Image: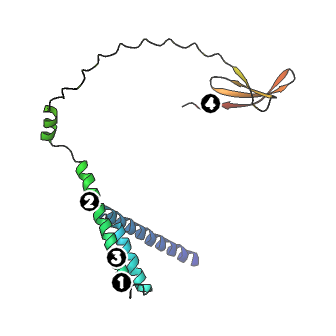
């Protein structure tokens, strides 16, 4: 019985939390679209501070100075977005035709003739595998390089003892 109530309570709290988070995302999206996030946050913080603390009793000037700064920032954000929107607008057909009809400048150099095609490179000889290398700092070890892997060996007198294989990355 109690576990069922706890389960129902969890489900209700989860639903409330989900609805609240969706509401906050929606409000944030609208504030972002309108470019008034900073102004709204400032007003919200000032409202909360005035409710719980007597912050703006005698210093109401500070509130208005901050509000004016936030309004100036908001207007600047609007102007910046408007300028970007104007810069990204498609060109009118008349503007494009005017640019195409403009004569080329007299001092423009004549185009250079196309270069002759480069000779086809000669194919490189195939690499020979395995290649053997000593391990730096550990003279008792050496490794063999193959086209697709490395193999590590330990020198044991005249013999080589296999230790492990590391495969190359194929990209």
Q: Determine the residue positioned at 37% across, 73% down.
A: 42
Say how the picture is coloured.
rainbow
Disc 3 designates what residue? Answer: 65
Between marks 4 and 3, how big is the CA–CA gap?
64 Å
Query: Could you say whether the residue bearing mark 2 is in a helix, strand or loop?
Result: helix
Q: Callout 3: few (<14), some (14-19), or many (20+) C-alpha neighbours within 10 Å?
A: few
Q: Determine the residue positioned at 44% across, 85% down.
A: 52
Sequence-first disc among 2 and 4: 2
Between marks 2 and 4, how big is the CA–CA gap?
54 Å
Counting from the top left corner in percent of width and height, residue 148 is at: 63, 26
Question: Is any atom of residue 1 visible in this view?
Answer: no
Disc 4 designates what residue? Answer: 168
User: Does 42 appear above or below 109?
Assistant: below
Sequence-first disc among 3 and 2: 3
Task: Tell me which corner region of the image, top left, top right, bottom left or bottom right, holds residue 70.
Answer: bottom left
Q: Is residue 154 left or right of residue 30?
A: right
User: Does 105 appear above or below 78?
Assistant: above
Disc 2 designates what residue? Answer: 79
Contact (Cβ within 8 Å) of mark 1 with mark 4: no
Sequence-first disc among 2 and 1: 1
Q: Quadrant of the C terminus?
A: top right
Disc 1 designates what residue? Answer: 60
Counting from the top left corner in percent of width and height, residue 112 is at: 29, 18
Q: Nearer the viewer, mark 4 or mark 3?
A: 3
Q: Is residue 78 left or right of residue 121?
A: left
Q: Nearer the viewer, mark 3 or mark 2?
A: 3
Question: Is any atom of residue 38 visible in this view?
Answer: yes
Task: Tell me which corner region of the image, top left, top right, bottom left or bottom right, holds residue 159.
Answer: top right
Sequence-first disc among 3 and 1: 1
Query: Could you say whether the residue bearing mark 1 is in a helix, strand or loop?
Result: helix
Q: Callout 1: few (<14), some (14-19), or many (20+) C-alpha neighbours within 10 Å?
A: few
Between marks 3 and 2, how big is the CA–CA gap?
21 Å
């Amino acid at each position: 019985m109690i576990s069922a109530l706890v389960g129902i309570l969890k489900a209700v709290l989860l639903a409330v939390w989900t609805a609240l988070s969706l509401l906050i995302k929606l409000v944030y999206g609208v504030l972002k679209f309108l470019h008034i996030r900073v102004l709204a946050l400032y007003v919200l913080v000032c409202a909360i501070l005035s409710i719980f603390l007597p912050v703006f009793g005698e210093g109401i000037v500070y509130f208005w100075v901050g509000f004016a700064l936030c309004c100036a920032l908001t207007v600047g954000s609007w102007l910046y977005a408007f300028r970007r929107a104007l810069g990204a607008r498609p060109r009118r057909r008349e503007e494009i035709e005017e640019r195409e009809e403009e004569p080329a400048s007299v001092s423009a150099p004549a185009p250079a003739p196309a270069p002759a095609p480069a000779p086809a490179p000669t194919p490189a000889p195939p690499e020979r595998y395995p290649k053997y290398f000593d391990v730096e700092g550990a003279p008792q070890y050496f490794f063999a390089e193959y086209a697709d892997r490395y193999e590590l060996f330990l020198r044991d007198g005249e013999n080589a003892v296999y230790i492990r294989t590391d495969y190359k990355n194929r990209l």
